[in-house]
Image (cartoon, grey):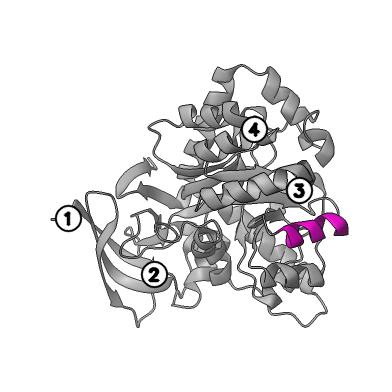
């Protein structure tokens, strides 16, 4: 017998995010979707004064530093390196001097903010070795949100314990990985199957030597930022099946540049999005999608470019994100066999009103118009973990 059944007027179903109606989701005792029923939709969605809900996949934040949530806007109008460069950046000084209970509260508040914004999973770059990993685990013990930790080590002896206790490694820069560590890390990577190794690169500037080492060493699976990559760099990323995570609003906050989104789109690289440092950026992936779209329009002016679609943008924070972070067997879409992680939006809210919503422009309406107050409920494993009063 199913654990529960959830009904909804409409939904974006499967990895294709296909618009369907009369959704019925049967959820088993593990919180996964056992059966999924729906009808095809042929007519337009009619605006109604009564609640008219649509179910969308739980969003995945592919890159965040959640522990600096307690220090919001401490970096306003300051340079990137001044704030986040380890070990002397302001962020790292504050992490070292702030009491544990304040950092813990910041983590919990940030997780609550994510649920309220329809984010059901996040991937965190965790500073401070095992201490940082344990801080996050303790802060979110029994908290209803999915997360993956990419830890950081200071010496080769720590790498084994970090990989054992985290879901992978996340380096501030590939320069932090000395040649003497690489062979040990290669062996550890083979032993810890399914673990992710990621690093920031080309956020503020492009270093050709460093980028070549990333490609040639074949250790890195996920690159964060790539803001200053050339078209040739992007071709090599695609050839080597390296996932790329963009954080456009945080790049804008620090004035570090615009990601080459149109070149990425032209090459068909399946990117995902992250909100990055909580101290600098609020945790809203709808804002992230809209900002990236506007950047793409500005950068495309006068050029022969395929413009981003709203459906592509929504995949960046759901289907693509799950695939890029190795989570696609369990997360990323409303599909049988995956966890019942999704949100309900009310299409009868005033900001959604338009004379016509169909299978094409539903994505424009959702991506370009959704505010946090439109998210009425967020489910994780079939349980309501956020409900807007």
Where does the N terminus fall, quadrant-wise?
A: bottom left
Q: Residues within 10 Å of mark 3 (few under 14, many from 20)?
A: some
Q: Looking at the magenta stretch, what is its main secondary structure?
A: helix
As drawn, 17 above or below 349: below
Q: Residues within 10 Å of mark 4 (few under 14, many from 20)?
A: few
**Earlier along the polypeptide chain: callout 1 or callout 3?**
1
Depth check, front residue: 65 or 115? 65
Say whether residue 312 is left or right of residue 346: right
Q: Give the Cα separation between the discs numbered 2 and 3.
A: 36 Å
Q: Dot 3 corresponds to which residue?
A: 174
Q: Give the Cα separation between the discs numbered 2 and 1.
A: 20 Å
Q: Give the Cα separation between the discs numbered 4 and 2.
A: 43 Å
Q: Give the Cα separation between the discs numbered 4 and 3.
A: 18 Å
Q: Position of residue 227 (x, y in %)?
A: 77, 58
**Earlier along the polypeptide chain: callout 4 or callout 1?**
1
As drawn, 35 above or below 200: below
Residue positioned 69% across, 44% down in the render: 171
């Amino acid at each position: 017998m199913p654990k529960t059944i959830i009904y909804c007027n409409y939904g974006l179903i499967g990895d294709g995010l296909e618009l369907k109606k009369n959704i019925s989701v049967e959820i088993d005792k593990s919180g996964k979707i056992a059966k999924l029923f729906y009808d095809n939709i042929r007519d337009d969605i009619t605006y109604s004064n009564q609640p008219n809900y649509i179910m969308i996949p739980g969003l995945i934040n592919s890159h965040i530093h959640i522990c600096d949530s307690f220090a919001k806007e401490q970096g306003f109008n300051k340079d990137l390196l001044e704030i986040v460069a380890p070990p002397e950046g302001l962020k790292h000084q504050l992490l070292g001097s702030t009491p544990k209970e304040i950092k813990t509260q910041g983590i919990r508040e940030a997780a609550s903010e994510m649920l309220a914004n329809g984010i059901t999973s996040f991937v965190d770059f965790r500073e401070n070795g095992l201490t940082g990993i344990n801080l996050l685990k303790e802060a979110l013990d029994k908290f209803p949100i999915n997360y993956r930790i990419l830890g950081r080590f200071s010496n080769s002896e720590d790498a084994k314990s970090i990989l054992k206790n985290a879901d992978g490694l996340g380096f501030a820069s590939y320069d932090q990985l000395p040649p003497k560590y690489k062979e040990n890390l290669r062996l550890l990577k083979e032993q810890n199957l399914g673990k992710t190794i990621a690093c920031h690169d080309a956020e503020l500037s492009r270093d050709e030597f460093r980028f070549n080492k990333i490609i040639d060493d074949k250790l890195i699976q996920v690159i964060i930022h790539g803001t200053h990559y050339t078209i040739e760099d992007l071709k090599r990323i695609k050839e080597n099946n390296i996932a790329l995570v963009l954080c456009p609003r945080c790049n804008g906050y620090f004035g570090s540049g615009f990601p080459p989104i149109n070149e990425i789109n032209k090459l068909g690289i399946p990117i995902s999005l992250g909100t990055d440092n909580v101290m600098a950026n609020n945790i809203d992936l709808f804002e992230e999608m809209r900002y990236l779209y506007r950047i793409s329009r500005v950068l495309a002016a006068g050029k022969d470019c395929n413009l981003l679609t709203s459906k592509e943008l929504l995949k960046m924070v759901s289907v693509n994100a799950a695939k890029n972070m190795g989570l696609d067997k369990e997360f990323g879409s409303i599909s049988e066999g995956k966890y019942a992680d999704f949100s309900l939006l009310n299409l009868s809210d005033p900001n959604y009103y338009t004379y016509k919503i169909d299978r094409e422009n539903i994505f424009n309406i959702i991506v370009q118009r959704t505010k946090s107050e439109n998210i009425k409920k967020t489910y994780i494993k079939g349980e309501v973990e956020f409900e807007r009063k």
